[in-house]
Amino acid sequence: NRKIVLNQRPQGEIRDGDLLLKEEPVRELRDDEVLIQTLWLSLDPYMRPRMNDSKGYMDPIEIGAPIVGESVGRVVESNSANYQAGDLVTVYSGWQEYCIIPGDAPMVYKIKDQGAPLQTYLGVAGMPGRTGYCGLMYVGKPKAGETVVVSAASGPVGTVVGQTAKQLGCRVVGVAGGPEKCRYVVEELGFDACVDYKAGNLEADMAAACPQGIDVYFENVGGEVTRAVAKLLNPGARVPICGYVSAYNAEDASKVETPFHVFGALDPKPEHRFFLVTEWQDQHQEITALLAGQVASGQLKYSETVAEGLENAVEAFKGMLKGKNFGKQLVHIAD
Ligand code: NDP
């Protein structure tokens, strides 16, 4: 079993020696345990803050432990009545080729075949998709005709936020890095506009893309995008704070100007709050089925970047935090 473990906590960007590839045999399965082979591993921005020693909303990864992460896997052997060999599941396996879980482990879900590709259960039909959907609907509460802005627009969260808001009849503006991503967001995903925050004209470009101001800002990135958006919020605006990836590699998190600082200082303050996708865990099955159905029918468009083999996961992860991914970043481990 090959795995990638946290060898030492990164200071700022991940460097050689922070994460290490290790190999050890798969141990014997005990009673009520299940052995799962990883087919696809999901790489997600939240993994970077969990490599730090500071306790956020989740515990830090322990030194020597595999990096946390969800995967799509196949049950190879089962001593539990709950699973049979061949079952396909999403499971928090960590970055490894095999994992062993108790038969009653939480957060393990059997994949029902609705015709959506397996790996989309880690992307637009998976945790990031549910994040986009729930954060938009339950915190953003958009109404037809309103202007909805979403940053990291070409990623799996942003993709679902924008297309869901379009289905509701909103004007949807994405923010993404570079002309290629912006073109894709408008032409393929169907957003009304997309602002390239790297083009050097952020404030003017945002204002031009949002002539009626902004009613909902779905926050994924923080930093300069947040400051530009803050100037355009309408009275009564809602700001679901999903994450702020621009700060995840910060060497000193206490020095970061977070979206809470920016939005909290406005007068009037927009309705803004951080949310976690797990707030709506009771709707996991229902929303997964909704999004997977839209993937299968072709209604929900998406893109993905695939690294081949666990040995390439670290480079892919470092690249994702800099926007080198185009759509959901995955690692393909096995068929
Ligand atoms: P993405 O696939 O969109 O990857 C992250 C993207 O962030 C990059 O591709 C890059 O896109 C953008 N980015 C990186 N650095 C910067 C920067 N300095 N300024 C602006 N943009 C930057 O990620 P996901 O769709 O998986 O996740 C999006 C957000 O949702 C993250 O903040 C994540 O932590 C959060 N999240 C929160 C959850 C929750 O429960 N609250 C659950 C899941 C995700 P570009 O090239 O456009 O810059």
Image (spheres, grey):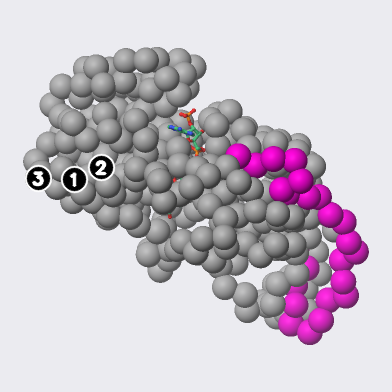
Q: Is 111 left or right of 76, judged from the image as shown?
A: left
Identify the residue under disc 1. 265
Q: Residue at x 32, y 15 (%)?
A: 201
Based on the displayed image, in which of its 4 quarters is residue 76 positioned?
A: bottom right
Q: CA distance from mark 1 to mark 3?
A: 9 Å
The mark lying in front, picked from 3 and 2, is: 2
Q: Is residue 72 above or below residue 331?
A: below
Q: Is 329 left or right of 215, judged from the image as shown?
A: right
Q: Residue at x 45, y 24 (%)?
A: 177
Q: Is residue 226 above or below residue 260?
A: above
Is the shortest distance between ligand 1 and the CB of mark 1 under 8 Å? no
- From which residue to which does the magenta span run? 13-37
Nearer the N terminus, badge 3 or badge 2? 2
Q: Is 143 left or right of 258, judged from the image as shown?
A: left
Residue 266 in the image, given as x and y percentages of width and height: 15, 43
Identify the residue under disc 3. 268
Asked whether the residues under the numbered discs 3 and 2 touch, taking CB atoms below 8 Å apart as contact, a structural biologist would say no
Could you classify mark 1 by the number of other residues whose Cα lies within 10 Å: few (under 14), some (14-19), or many (20 or more)?
Answer: few
Asked whether the residues under the numbered discs 1 and 2 touch, taking CB atoms below 8 Å apart as contact, a structural biologist would say yes
Q: Nearer the viewer, residue 119 or 15?
A: 15
Residue 73 in the image, given as x and y percentages of width and height: 70, 57
